[in-house]
């Protein structure tokens, strides 16, 4: 009887925590604009350098004043935040600046947030206890936890009469290993099947909308296109992509409405790239490392965030531009990188 009562109370607490999060009806403003800040690799872990990360958040939010923050993994350091109390403490610091400024957010997990499904569930329950959190549990039938989508509507939409102008897809790229291969984690086939199903429905119903994908681990195509097509930005380390290609990029190409995919994970890469022949309007972009823990960029590369400015009007539908704002309060000028045709660089074989 005591065991049954304990299980009931635990389930009740989880339901209460999830109900606290208020799902918002996002819209473009009257000027047809909606701005997103991408925070990535914050690595909060309850140490003094966390204060430096908070300072970066303050600078970005104050200058850019985004409508939404997307956190693309490694938000906390699960190796150090290994109890519920430590997770709560780290999360208070993580989202504190967004709470102060009343800015909603959504998360997807990286490889360091939690080592197993149970701990990821714990983190999600803590996150969803905040009314501003828009994060959601994905379907139980597929891999990962943070597989969900968020709609952004046209300026004149109402909940009863809506027109979807953009969809944000959050995908969980796992911890390590991909389909039996050593190395980095990946978005797995059953997640891609879910993505295909959901994104196809949006494309049929709202053909002029734009889709954006947020994940942690970069796609293998990031490495390929850096060497074979034009890119903008800096590559200071190898692209830590999975050895096995599960086909997410091709799924985005086939959908036709996905125009941007944003990842974290590589702390000193910030470039955007694409394939002119396969999908010239689909850009793959690294974020800029926001957090101070683990390894860091060296000047003249500074901590910061990638900003995504969306535009919507009846003539062109939804379009975007993107830039990096750093902790120096500057917009980063990202250099052009021409194809170098180097074909012997590969995704890492070890995690």
Image (cartoon, rainbow, N blue to C red):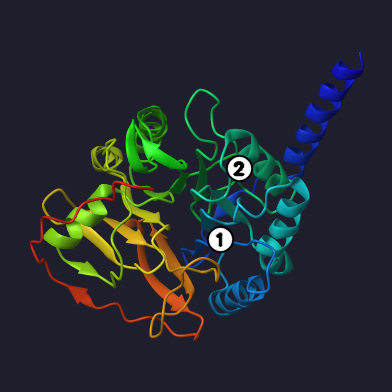
Q: Where in the figure is residue 45, as x and y percent of width and height?
A: 65, 61
Determine whether the residue tagged by mark 1 lies in a helix, strand or loop. Answer: strand
Front of the two marks 1 and 2: 1
Front residue of 273/50: it is: 50
Q: Position of 266 compared to 55: left or right?
A: left
Q: Position of 179 compared to 66: left or right?
A: left
Determine whether the residue tagged by mark 2 lies in a helix, strand or loop. Answer: loop
Q: Find the residue positioned furthest to the front.
A: 350
Count of marks, rendered view? 2
Decide which of tag 1 and tag 2 comes sooner along the chain: 1
Q: Where in the figure is residue 254, as x and y percent of width and height?
A: 24, 37
Q: Is residue 315 visible?
A: no
- The circle drawn on residue 69 is 1
Which residue is at a point 29% across and 64% down the rendered structure image? 272
Which residue is at a point 39% across and 56% down the rendered structure image? 262
Q: Is residue 296 visible?
A: yes
Q: Where in the figure is residue 117, as x and y percent of width and height?
A: 58, 34
Which residue is at a point 81% across and 29% down the rendered structure image? 10
Q: Where in the figure is residue 286, as x and y percent of width and height?
A: 36, 62
Relative to 324, is 223 above or below?
Answer: above
The image quarter containing residue 281 is bottom left
- The circle drawn on residue 351 is none
Q: Position of 282 compared to 33: left or right?
A: left
Which residue is at a point 26% across and 50% down the rendered structure image? 347
Front residue of 224/24: it is: 224
Q: Find the residue positioned furthest to the right.
A: 2
Quarter holding the N terminus? top right
User: How many neighbours does mark 2 have within 10 angstroms: few (below 14), some (14-19), or many (20 or more)?
Assistant: few
The image quarter containing residue 274 is bottom left
Relative to 321, is 55 above or below?
Answer: below
Residue pointed to by mark 2: 159
């Amino acid at each position: 009887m005591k065991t049954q009562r304990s299980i009931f109370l635990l389930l009740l607490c989880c339901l209460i925590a999830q109900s606290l999060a208020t799902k918002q009806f996002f819209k473009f403003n009257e000027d047809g604009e909606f701005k997103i800040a991408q925070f990535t690799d914050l690595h909060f872990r309850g140490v003094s350098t966390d204060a430096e990360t908070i300072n970066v958040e303050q600078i970005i939010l104050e200058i850019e004043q985004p409508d939404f923050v997307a956190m693309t993994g490694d938000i906390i350091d699960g190796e150090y935040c290994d109890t519920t109390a430590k997770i709560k403490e780290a999360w208070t610091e993580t989202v504190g600046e967004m709470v102060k400024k009343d800015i909603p957010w959504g998360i997807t997990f990286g490889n360091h947030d939690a080592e197993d499904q149970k701990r990821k569930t714990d983190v999600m329950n803590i996150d969803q206890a905040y009314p501003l959190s828009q994060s959601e549990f994905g379907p139980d039938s597929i891999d990962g936890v943070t597989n969900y989508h968020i709609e952004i509507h046209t300026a004149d939409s109402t909940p009863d009469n809506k027109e979807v102008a953009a969809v944000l897809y959050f995908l969980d790229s796992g911890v390590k290993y991909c389909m039996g291969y050593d190395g980095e984690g990946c978005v797995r086939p059953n997640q891609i099947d879910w993505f295909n199903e959901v994104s196809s429905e949006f494309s049929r119903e709202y053909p002029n909308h734009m889709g954006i994908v947020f994940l942690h681990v970069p796609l293998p195509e990031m490495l390929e296109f850096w060497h074979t097509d034009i890119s903008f930005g800096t590559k200071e380390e190898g692209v830590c992509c999975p050895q096995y290609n599960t086909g997410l990029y091709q799924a985005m190409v086939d959908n036709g409405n996905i125009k941007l995919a944003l990842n974290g994970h590589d702390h000193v890469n910030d470039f955007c790239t694409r394939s002119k022949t396969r999908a010239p309007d689909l850009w793959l972009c690294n974020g800029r490392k926001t957090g101070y823990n683990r390894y860091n960029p060296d000047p003249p590369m500074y901590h910061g965030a990638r900003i995504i400015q969306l535009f919507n009007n009846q003539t062109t539908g939804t379009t975007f531009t993107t830039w990096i704002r750093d902790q120096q309060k500057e917009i980063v000028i990202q250099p052009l990188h021409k194809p170098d045709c180097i074909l012997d660089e590969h995704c890492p074989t070890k995690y």
